[in-house]
Amino acid sequence: MRKEQEDAFWQTIKAFKEIGLLHHVMIIGSWAEYLFPSLFETDFMPNLKTRDVDFFYRNINIPKEKINVVQKLKDIGYVYDEVDGISRFYKEDLLELEFLTRVLGAGSEGKINIKPLGITSEGLRVINILSDFAREVKVTGTDDETYSLTIPEPAVYVIQKILTNPICEPSEKKAKDIVAVKELLYHIEKSSEHKAKLNEVYKALSAKQLKTVNQVCKENQIVLPLN
C-alpha cells in the first residue's frame, strides 16, 4: 500500500469523526484486514491491494438529524458520483468509497436511501451476518490520532468471505479471497479467543449457509478449526 493511500484513509476517518458519522459505520471488505493486526498476537500482516473502501451503515433510521457527508468528503478532495444509481466517492487514484446497508425480513436487495446522509446505498443481505459480530477497536492513524472503529470479528469476516465466494465477481477475486481466508484462519487457529468466536459464528449459520460454507471449504481445501 502506498503511503499516500494510507494517509487518505485516515484523513477520511478523521472527517467521519468530525461530522459524527464514524460510530454509525462498520469498516468491512478488505480494508477491515488493515485493522486486524491489533487483534492478533501473531505477525498477521494484511495483503491490501485495493482502493475500494466499503462502509456498512448499520441502521439507516438513525440519527434523525442530517449528516452532510457529501460536502465533507468534497472538502477533503473527493469527487461525488453515482454509478447505476448508487452513490460513490472518489479521491484521485487513491480511494473509492461506497456505503452498504443490510436487508432485513422480506426486503429486496438493491438501492436503499440512507436519509441521514442524503445518499443512495446498495442493500445486500449477505452482509447482515457482519452486524451480529461487530467489534470496536482503538487504532492510531498515520496522523497520530487514536480512533474508535467498528469492524467485523475476524472469524465472521472469514465466514462471510466463504459465504460470498460462489457469487463473487470478477472471478479472479474468488481466488484472492480464498488466499485471504486461509491466511486469516492460520492466525485465528493460534488464538483460543478467535477460535471460540469462529465456533460461535459457525453455530449461528442457517442450514443453507452451512451448506455453502461446507461446499466452498471442500472445493478449496479449507479446514475450519472448529471444536
Image (spheres, rainbow, N blue to C red):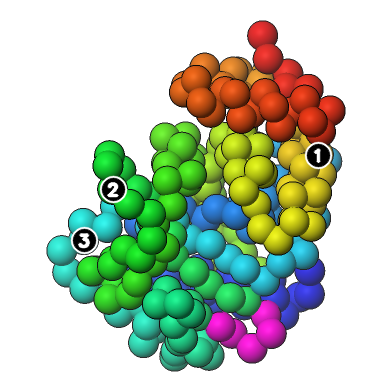
Q: In which quarter of the image is residue 68?
A: bottom left
Q: Residue at x 71, y 32 (%)?
A: 216
* Residue 165 x %, y %: 67, 44
Secondary structure of residue under mark 3: loop
Circle 1 Cα neighbour tier, 10 Å, few/some/many (<14 / 14–19 / ≥20): some
The residue carrying mark 1 is 183
Please, what secondary structure does the residue beneath circle 2 have? loop
Range covered by the magenta-colored residues: 90-94
Residue at image point 67% right, 23% down: 214
Residue in the foreground of this view, choosing between 201 and 3: 201
Q: Upstream in the sequence, badge 1 or badge 3?
A: 3
CA–CA distance in space, label 1 to label 2: 34 Å
Numbered mark located on residue 63 in the image: 3
Q: In which quarter of the image is the N terminus?
A: bottom right
Q: Looking at the picture, which amino acid does disc 3 mark?
A: Pro
Whether 46 is among the magenta residues is no
How far apart marks 3 and 2 lie (CA) works out to 21 Å
Amino acid on which the number 1 mark rests in the picture: Glu
Quarter of the rendering occupied by the C terminus: top right
Residue topped by disc 2:
107
- Check contact, mark 3 vs mark 2: CB within 8 A: no
Query: First in sequence: mark 3 or mark 2?
Result: 3
Give above or below for 108 relative to 69.
above
Instruction: Specify the amino acid type for callout 2.
Output: Gly
- Secondary structure at numbered mark 1: helix
Residue appearing at x 70%, y 76% in the figure:
5
Determine the main secondary structure of the stretch shown in magenta.
Answer: loop
